[in-house]
Image (cartoon, rainbow, N blue to C red):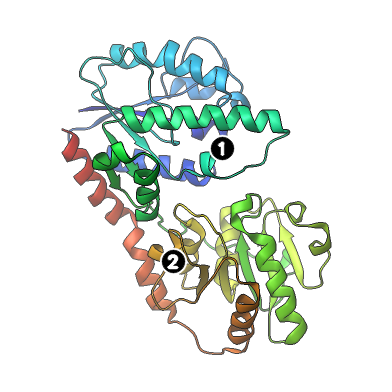
Amino acid sequence: MRVGLDYRTVGTSPQSGISRQVYALESALHGLPGIELERFTVAPLGDETRLQAHCPVWGCAKTAMHQPQNRLRFEAGFLPRALREQQIDLYISTFNMGLPLPPKPKGLRTVVLLHDLFQITLNNYHANRLKALIYKTSDRLSIAYAVHSADRVWTPSHYSADETARLFPKAAGKIRVLPNQVDGFCELAADLSARQLPKRYWLLVGTRELRKNVPFLVDAWRQARQQSPAVPELVLVGSLEHLPEVQRTLPGIRALSGVSDAELHALYRQASRLWQPSYAEGFGLPVIEALSVGTPVAVASGTSLDEITPPSAPRFSPTDGPALTQLMLSLGERTEDESPEQNRQWAQRFNHHAYRRRLAELIEELK
């Protein structure tokens, strides 16, 4: 079977969570018997990517790959012909949309990897209202087309699967769950002494998106700190610019940017706990990364975090600030916690062995 893989996200943001899953999918497909894999993407003229993937003759800046006009040019003007010429049997789009527009090559089967639907159900950061409207309309049309035209829709969680079926009920029969691969860290943990971190701290990873609900958690943490010195300092991986101005200068809070994988590894290992307060989450990569090194977690309830987190882990409402403050006071005083080894064992259910087994089942279904 000749499989085509949409590689565009790798060019745009090679270290993103979505790109990590593209790498995982690519590696797993290479390991399956009888699979020949080809990459398809756009790239600037002269870029090294053109030696590794099928690209249109025209070039495109990496930062412009997902602009509507460039997507249309790729998905309608290039992709159908390229898939036909390469005799691709199965094409997998990897970023919620991006399937080839008609005419569909004869015999081609398609899959869309639908990480979540927040592009069309929630508000996102854009330069202005007009740009937000253009992108939301484009994304809605593109996702709807992908979901309805794909032979299968793969989602990383049952939560995302249920949301897809709720919004697109006619597609319910072709939705399958492929949990994300999270293998932990290959690199050794970095030396963080230059970061001058406190001996004891709580950690939160990702600050930009509104759905991460970071100001809500920071406010509860502020109140807990005022009531008890046992509540640790708070370290954010991201930028303070995404917080309300009054929260940026709170004593005991700091943000780290430009964090390498080795530094992130060390941050997880040294944290007393990871907090994930999202009110909307399609999977929750930081939770599994923290658990993979034995670090305990506390998560907001109501989305995919419910299913990827150990049942014994503390949970809280993403809207009840006073209850979260009380939980923080309780956890700040706690000296014993979940077994690090149990946390690591839980994370193993998302490793490359589990991912490859599930992918093999889904590919077999499409043969």
The reply to whether residue 51 is visible in this rendering is yes
Q: Residue 87, position in %: x, y?
A: 25, 16
**Which residue is identified by label 2?**
292
User: In this view of the protein, which residue sits in the foreground, 316 or 186?
Assistant: 316
User: In this view of the protein, which residue sits in the foreground, 202 or 276?
Assistant: 276
Image quarter for residue 95? top left
- Real-space Cα separation, disc 2 to disc 1, in angstroms: 24 Å
159 to 140, vertically: above or below = below
The reply to whether residue 187 is visible in this rendering is no
Q: Quadrant of the C terminus?
A: top left
Q: Residue at x 80, y 61 (%)?
A: 248
Relative to 32, 348 lies left or right: right
The label number, if any, that marks residue 135 in the structure image: none
Mark 2 crowd level (few <14, some 14–19, many ≥20, 10 Å Cα): many
User: In this view of the protein, which residue sits in the foreground, 145 or 183?
Assistant: 145
For the residue marked with disc 1, what is the amino acid?
A: Ser
**Which residue is identified by label 1?**
13
Relative to 16, 159 lies left or right: left
Mark 1 crowd level (few <14, some 14–19, many ≥20, 10 Å Cα): some
Q: Residue at x 51, y 72 (%)?
A: 297
| Sequence-earlier tag: 2 or 1 | 1
User: In this view of the protein, which residue sits in the foreground, 136 or 108?
Assistant: 136
207 to 9, vertically: above or below = below
Q: Residue 329, position in %: x, y?
A: 64, 84
Q: Residue 35, position in %: x, y?
A: 22, 32
